Image (cartoon, rainbow, N blue to C red):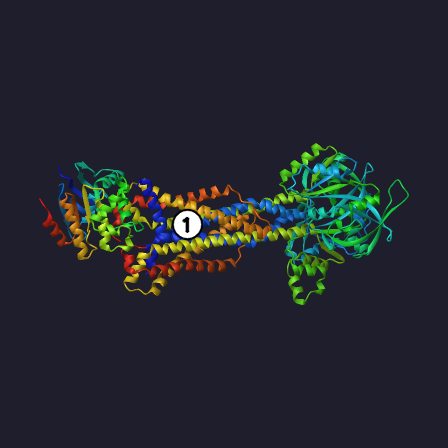
Amino acid sequence: MSRRKMFLKMVTASLLRRRSRMLIALLSIAIGATILSGLVTIYYDVPRQMGAQFRGYGANMILVPSGEEKMTLEKARECLSVIPEDQLLGATPYRYANVEMTSRQRTFVAAATDFEQVQATSPYFAVEGRWPEGDREVLVGKETAETIGVKLNNVIELSYKPEDTYVKNTLNMTVVGILETGGDEEAYIFTTLKAMDALTGVSGQLDVMEMSVSAASEELENYVAEISEKNSDMSARLVKRVTKSETTVLAKLQSLVFLVTAVVLLLTMICVSTTMMAVVSERRKEIGLRKALGASDQSIRAEFLGEGMFLGLLGGILGTALGFAFAQVVSVNVFGSSITFQPLLLPITVIVSMGIAALSCLLPIRRAIEIDPALVLKGE
Amino acid sequence: MIRGALFRQRGKMLLIAFTIALGTSLATAMLNVMLDVGDKVNQELKTYGANITVKPKDSSLLSDLYDVEDDGDVIQTSYLKEEEVGKLKTIFWAFNIVDFAPFIDTGITLADGNQVKLVGTWFNHHLELPTGENLDVGVTSLRTWWDITEGSWLDEQTEGTENAVMIGAVLAEREGWKVGDAIFLEGPAGSCEAVVAGVFDAGGDEDEQIYAPLDLVQELSDTEGKVAYIEVSALTTPDNDLAKRAAQNPAALSAKDYETWYCTAYVSAICYQIQEAITDSVASAVRQVAESEGAILDKTQLLMILITILSLIGSALGISNLVTASVMERAQEIGLLKAIGAKDRSITGLVLTEILITALVGGVAGYFLGFGFAQLIGHSVFGSAIEMKVMVIPIVIVLISLVTAAGSLPAIRMVLRLRPAEVLHGSKA
Amino acid sequence: MSLLELKNISKIYGELKALDNVNIKVEKGEWVAIMGPSGSGKSTMMNIIGCMDKPSLGEVLLDGVDISKESSKKLTEIRRDKIGLIFQQFHMVNYLTAVENVMVSQYYHSMPDEEEALEALGRVGLRERAKHLPSQLSGGEQQRVCVARALINAPELILADEPTGNLDEDNENIVLDLFRQLHREGTTLIVVTHDPEVAEIINENFQE
């Protein structure tokens, strides 16, 4: 039998035959590794997941024509190609016009838009009734609805007189929803772009495009610069109220999770070490015996480290899996979406676990080795 | 006997006490942070600005509409009273009203004939409340996202700023104005000369407007003592079903529900109370801010709860693990006690008492350590102290006692099952 | 030349003189008993001879080499190469089987060899108990494993500290028989004991 085989035999015997102690040590390392991998995963995932929540504040970028000319939907779409699809949560075109409500003889602002996109860029819009589906359906702001006294399912007649003609274009529209936002939008009447085209007789024009982009503020600034550079007749701007506040709050949240992670990790790792130390200290007598039998300090250290590192390896792998499961549970419960596994986390967790295990073995071993074997072996 | 055991095994007991202290500090820190994180993040979210607007009851939407028409001709039929603005701090949830500012606007004509919108408001208005409380409120703290590109925020509290104004960056560029320039403003009811105190970049429509002290605008538009609307920034509790029902019609709630709703800082409850305080007003939640705020608060709290649970499980397992290890280590001693005739129960009592005393020492130290960690997190993340919640203490005590007992009892029982002879023969299993 | 020679050895712990100017010579092949009541410094002397401790004063010559000033690392090597130790409390690695415990000694000395280890167990009559853990062995059996472990590397000197102190009469006889046999084969044995009967047996068997 070779020396290596004997070494492995001793290590495995210690692991298998001292099962209860080894389970304790393994459990403690696995706990540490679980917390490490779980928290680190969450830490890296928080900005992404929280960022998505912050999109609830609505559009963080707008696109407007830089000159007097209006822009077309095609042109706007072209500008948007700069932003990766998975980051662009929604892009809502808006076209405004003053329309007259025939029965009330009053003028209102009509905002034509794409209702599907509105729900993506402005998730805070609360609609009583339902969102319009056809071109003859409109959404009326709460304030306007109250002023003119329209109710759900009323039919209103909207008309618009293009500048160069004497004929008014008139459309009958059904009110399918009343919009509540607590902001200026409550004064508008929302129609589809097609209805607006029919009213005005001019199609394909836009005043502004609102975008909700899930990206950090530097990234947003890069997109803005790129769009403006590529299209001299377009200008992209950030909605400062949203982007600046998001940067501030998100930075706080991330540093919160960072500090919490750091504190929890620090304390857990010390906890793991004390347990490992207790398990190793218990074997002082064995260390003394081995020394008396002629073991050199190095070989004793090698044996115990071998054991510790093996436990670290096992605990690290176990902990990575458990930690990922935990992060997944958190992500699904808190953010309602799953996370992707970071492959790099496995080696990191395993290396840290092995390092901690080795370190916490070394201290008690060193203390045991320094003691004369005679003192350890003498009596009970 | 216990004292003897504690002192003679100082090293081992120290290790246990140390670990329990760490576990306790982890639990204390996480629980305290978790319980306070809602308030803290709520404060942070105030950077998004007001979440409630208060308007006069019969306000027409004409102001908004004509504004879009951009002819600068504002027709406002009803107003709120300026003298009532301070009443915001007298409502039930006054403590949750963080900031507010009244606004009034008017169209004005510049010296070159251009029309712009002039907004009158409080910048850092000093209020002395009947309650004796002093506070500064206004847009300086409500518009955190404004970049002051030139000059500085208008300081109402220094002399000679009655005629100072702040101008939007776009307007400043168009008109070629600099800080210190005197500009001529012609309002519907008078004219004056104002001095540019600062230029701001707000990234929105405000960039083409002029902001001036409330009094100045009232004078120019003959609206002394009147305000058009008030923006309020309040700390709120995320809405639930009750709040949603109440928002529809508070009168429809049962007496008990009404009380619960009224005494919770729901945005609808605060709006309701503002309406009670200010004559003929309608307070409504700015959904853009209120909705997202609720979502983010909920998520953050849930996140912290889950992290706290993980760390509690971690420290519980860590502690019981070590306690188990330390009991096993004493197999020989326990065997000896058994051999000299000690009853199982007295041995269990002895070991348990020892460990619990150790746990107590470690726990007390850990509580303070954990509190320190919580403050460290509070100060470095939010720049303010984490409130010390009394309820954390009993939770931690119960938790640590349970965990320590759970860690030691099975181990003691296991060791007691061993035959004393076996243990004493140095072949402890 | 003597195998072991203690010259004017003293061991002082603070005020206490555990050993005071001791002189001993042990020749190769001798079977020596060191006797005395508890507290007479037997264990201290045993530790010094076993290279587990150093004298405060004096010289220890092992194979003519003075080891009293050696580093503890060097002492470990000497102990490994030249001395086999047997303890009163047996001291086995409790998670290793009997044969593995013997092999541990081989592992630190040179090369583990299961055959040789089993042979050594055979010599102490425990071949069929080779795969048992210490907890499955009686005290006497454990001590016999320890004897096998002490002699596996063919040391020049076997040092036994109260080897029969924890044993009943039957097992004591078995162990002493083993020593007798080793002595006949020419192994040098030093036995520390406070038991006059053991000393008597050693005395009877000692062959000049």
Name the residue tied to disc 1: A26
Tell me if residue B162 comes above or below residue B31 in the rendering: above
Residue A62 location, quadrant: top right
User: Residue B39: x, y in percent?
Assistant: 59, 53
Question: What secondary structure is found at the residue carrying circle 1?
Answer: helix
Q: Which residue lies furthest to the right in this view?
A: A166
Which quadrant would the N terminus of chain A be assigned to in this image? Answer: top left
> Which residue is situated farthest in the bottom direction here?
B255
Q: How crowded is mark 1: few (under 14 residues within 10 Å), some or many (20 or more)?
A: many
A110 with respect to B336 (left or right): right
Residue A46, position as x, y percentages in the image: 57, 46
Report if residue B50 is visible in the image: yes
Res B79 seen here: no
Nearer-the-camera pick, A220 or C118: C118
Tell me the kind of residue under disc 1: Leu
x then y, percent, for residue C102: 26, 46
Chain letter of disc 1 in the image: A
Q: Is residue B80 above or below residue A162?
A: below
- Numbered disc total: 1
